[in-house]
Amino acid sequence: MEPFTTLRSRTVVLPAANIDTDQIIPARFLTTTTRTGLGKNLFADWRYEESGAPRADFALNRPAARACQILVAGRNFGCGSSREHAPWALLDYGLRAVVSTQIADIFRSNALKNALLPVVVDESTSNWLIANPGAEITLDVAAGTLTLPSGVSAQFPLEAFARHCLLHGVDELGYLLTRADEIAAYEARA
Amino acid sequence: MARAPQTLFEKVWRAHEVSPESAATPAVLYIDLHLIHEVTSPQAFALLRERGLPVRRPERALATMDHSTPTLTAQVFGGAPIAIDSAARQVRTLEANCREFGVELLGLTHAQRGIVHVIGPELGLTQPGKTIVCGDSHTSTHGALGALAFGIGTTEVAHVLATQCLLQRKPGTLAVNVHGRLREGVTAKDLILAIIGRLGIAGGTGHVIEYRGETIRALDMDERLTVCNMSIEAGARAGMIAPDETTFAYLAGRPRAPQGAAFERALDAWRQLPTDAGARFDREVDFDAAAIEPMITYGTNPGMVIPIGGFIPERADDAAFGQALAYMGLTPGAAIKDQPVNVVFVGSCTNARLSDLRSAAAVLRGRHVAPGITMLVVPGSQEVKRQAEAEGLHQVFLDAGAQWRESGCSMCLGMNGDLVGAGQYAISTSNRNFEGRQGKGARTLLASPITAAASAVRGRVTDPRELT
């Protein structure tokens, strides 16, 4: 994985709370056997008309959104299924971070495995971001900060090992494989 | 020195620590049983192939196919091609991966195939004290037997295939204490819907739930599986119920449970698992079972749930709430009872075990599905199907005008083409009522098998107690 240190980008905002993984990538697109190409179906049922034409009023369809790498969403983003297709679709679209006041456990874990940064912020920071779509903000992984255009920063929590993996581009599978002797010892005593 | 009292979760967790967590690193947690299905595994096997890695312990994995598989007999057994090409490709990919990596597969025509969370317990593979994972959020189901079982993503599927381990931070513990007796016509599905309604769909985030109290002890194993299944709908990592005589009786004699003397030895270990007196949970919540009514959802997440005799809440200042009701085509303040429905689905890892089918059949016996209603009954496994047919339940469903299918996830998520039409209302015994879950524009009302069956008879939302 590429190291993830900082990200400066404008935001695209989906204010709804409880955006579940069925919205992020509907089940009918899960019959794929690869992890690529899911971006075109990201939020498919919100993003396209019956005819397949993009809905002009949907935030991700606005021309400015194409350059945005940070998604700001309402509370409890990514609830529902364990499909890793959800972070794959977000990344394939071009997003690299999701900001919410709460992010569901499995989605968060899947996001980190793919260097999609889950950012959980306090309510007032979130409210400001939702009210100001397109704001240019900076995410700093080492410091665990989200910095608003005003220069005010909010802290976001990041588990120590996840931070290490992001900063150094460490692949968890590679790390786990270095623990093979301990795993064998466990198997011998269990 | 006596050790500090521990919860069921802590005992299972500690017994599986290859190394405990530290400030800098998560625990390396050993996984006893890895269940695999066709949708979330292809990219994991591909990762192993890219890195030249074998499956470390193939005997600890079991694969089956359920999500994208057809439920029409002609496509399962009759040689007719699977209607969706990409689904057919997924099925073939799983077959090839299992062959290449030496993983046992209960394939499309296998007599023991079924929904992964139905066959684990049914085969006796799901056992107290085990760690169990699967690339599916409803893996929480297996906690009903006192296992620590949770859903993982595809990258983690690869981790388990390659190392039999996962890197995990220890979650918190949440005791859900349920006291009193469930009333007549109130099922385990109603209980868990009521719990989710109160906890909220993110209320369990970061926690493992242990369901406790005499109401839980009185549930049979199928009912416990229904309760633990929906733990994820409260946002919880897992749900667990302490093993007891109900658990042991359920497991005795199952094909992949320990047999004979080994079973007796296992019992000694399993009896040590329940939470010790005095053990502390990070949070506790109490429920009065006798106050719970048959429940039904009205919105677009499982926490939007009310008693079947209740009224849809009014929240004029909540835009998201308004949007959910607009999607559902329902009116704030209106009764949910008598809402017309188009489709009735009895199935899924939540409610497609034998007792679920028996209870739905009991409502339908001698009755008929209302004109214009499509009703699908999809058993949770081929074994459930066989047992149901041995009892003649399939005939009850067919006589009532319902369709009787081969097992699979089917209309719960519509991946296989079993879909609810746009704008149509479905009463479903499944676990998610998200927008578009059962088909684009489909409107899902989650309920118990008896509520679904009663509603099928009347063609509108019906309190099952009116038909018994």
Image: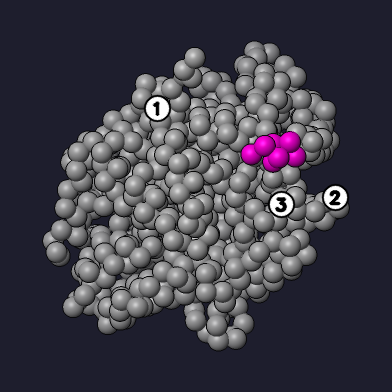
Quick one: label 1 or label 3, which is nearer the N terminus?
A: 3
Quick one: label 1 or label 2, which is nearer the N terminus?
A: 2
Rendered image: mark on residue B276: 1
Range of the magenta residues?
A183-190
Q: Report the chain holding disc 3.
A: B
Rendered image: mark on residue B57: 3
Q: Nearer the observer, disc 1 or disc 2?
A: 1
Asked if both marks, 3 and 2, belong to the same chain, the answer given is yes
Residue tagged by mark 2? Answer: B51
Work out how far the residue at label 1 is from the one at label 2, CA to CA, in angstroms. Answer: 44 Å
Q: Which residue is rendered at x = 60% and y = 40% of the image? A: A107
> Can you tell which quarter of the image residue B191 is in?
top left
Quick one: label 3 or label 2, which is nearer the N terminus?
A: 2
Asked if both marks, 1 and 2, belong to the same chain, the answer given is yes
Q: Which residue is rendered at x = 71% and y = 40% of the image? A: A188
Q: Disc 1 vs disc 3: Cβ atoms closer than 8 Å?
A: no
Q: Nearer the viewer, residue B214 or B23?
A: B214
Circle 3 — which element? loop
Q: Nearer the viewer, residue B310 or B23?
A: B23
Callout 2 amino acid: Arg
Circle 2 — which element? helix
Instruction: Rate crowding at label 3 as few (under 14), some (14 to 19) or many (20 or more) other CA atoms within 10 Å.
Output: some
Instruction: Rate crowding at label 1 as few (under 14), some (14 to 19) or many (20 or more) other CA atoms within 10 Å.
Output: some
Callout 3 amino acid: Arg
Callout 1 amino acid: Asp
Q: Where does residue A20 sit, x and y in percent of width and height?
A: 52, 45
